[in-house]
């Protein structure tokens, strides 16, 4: 039997009809903002990628070289490139020696000559920088204020020159080295990559070249003579020291006696 649907009472209120919210029509302003937001998204990703790349190129090498002896440096690479253009340059001489195979006199001599506050500063000697500024402001010959830590940063990773870019990178690398390396490691690396003459890099190669024995056998006088040429090893010569180099070496020996060998034990 066919069922007849009940008729609705005309006086019964009907339930309101559900209406879906209307989508806002696309406007030209909204269409114009989409490429901008897309560009901002890619810009942020690119910036993050550059940041990660920068960190990998700075922190990772510094961390690795805390334990791995650097087999070369940017300055040694530069010297090898110079030899390609000028084959008459002497062959590069370099040999890594660990901390315990370097005479204490060599360690103390470079501190006395280059950075007497090495054990106490955080990589930058602010007092020395101020003194250098005042000296240079008077119009005399330029004086530097680079610490041993700064020289390690420059010699390992950077290039020579006085540009603001290089100086800024040097400060950044210096602070990283000071945070990630102990002072003993900083001095060990410095003694192994410093230039002591044309193509002579590291205290072991210098000791063999000029004195015919290992760096472990360096005397105070020999160590002071090596340290005396560090400001300009291509102009100041160990093999034929000028009166200035000899005078500077004697001054370094006096400073070594004042500082005392106990300074090395503090590192």
Image (cartoon, rainbow, N blue to C red):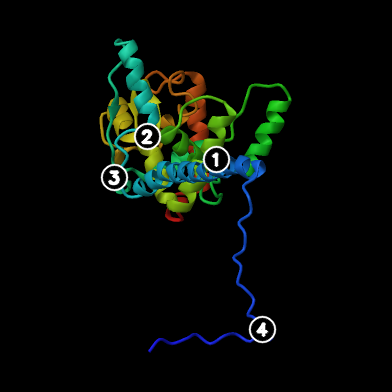
How many discs appear? 4
Mark 2 or 4: in front is: 4
Helix, strand or loop status at disc 4: loop
The quadrant where residue 213 appears = top left
Q: From the viewer's perspective, is the residue at label 2 or at label 1 nearer?
A: 1
Q: Residues within 10 Å of mark 2 (few under 14, many from 20)?
A: many
Tell me the quadrant of the picture where the N terminus can be found.
bottom left
Q: Is residue 168 visible?
A: yes
Identify the residue position indicated by label 1 in the image. Answer: 39
**Which numbered disc, 3 or 2, marks the residue that appears first in the sequence?**
3
Question: Which residue is disc 2 drawn over?
Answer: 193
Question: Furthest-bottom residue in view?
Answer: 1
Q: SS of the residue at dot 3? A: helix
Q: Would you identify the image quadrant in which residue 223 lies?
A: top left
- For the point 71% across and 32% down, the residue is 134
N-term mark: 1 or 4: 4
For mark 4, what is the residue?
A: 10
In this rendering, would 266 be left or right of 130? left
Q: How far apart in space, not on screen, are marks 3 and 4 (Cα)?
A: 108 Å
């Amino acid at each position: 039997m066919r069922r007849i649907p009940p008729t609705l009472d005309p006086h019964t209120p009907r339930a309101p009809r559900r209406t879906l919210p209307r989508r806002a029509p696309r406007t030209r302003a909204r269409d114009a903002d989409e490429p901008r937001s897309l560009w901002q998204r890619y810009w942020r990703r690119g910036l993050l990628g550059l940041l990660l790349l920068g960190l990998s190129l700075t922190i990772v090498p510094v961390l690795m070289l805390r334990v791995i002896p650097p087999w070369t440096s940017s300055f040694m690479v530069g010297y090898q490139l110079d030899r390609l253009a000028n084959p008459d340059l002497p062959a590069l001489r370099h040999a890594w020696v660990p901390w315990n195979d370097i005479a204490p006199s060599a360690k103390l001599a470079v501190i006395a000559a280059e950075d007497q506050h090495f054990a106490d500063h955080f990589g930058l000697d602010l007092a020395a920088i101020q003194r250098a500024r005042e000296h240079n402001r008077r119009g005399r010959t330029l004086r530097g204020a680079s610490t041993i830590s700064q020289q390690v940063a420059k010699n390992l990773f950077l290039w020579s020159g006085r540009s603001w870019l290089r100086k800024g990178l040097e400060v950044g690398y210096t602070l990283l080295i000071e945070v990630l390396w102990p002072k003993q490691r900083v001095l060990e690396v410095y003694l192994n990559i410093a230039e002591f003459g044309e193509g002579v890099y590291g205290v072991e190669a210098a000791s063999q070249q000029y004195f015919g024995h290992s760096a472990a056998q360096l005397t105070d006088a020999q160590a002071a003579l090596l340290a005396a040429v560090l400001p300009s090893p291509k102009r100041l010569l160990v093999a034929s020291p000028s009166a200035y180099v000899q005078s500077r070496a004697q001054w370094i020996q006096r400073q070594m006696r004042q500082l005392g060998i106990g300074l090395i034990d503090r590192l």
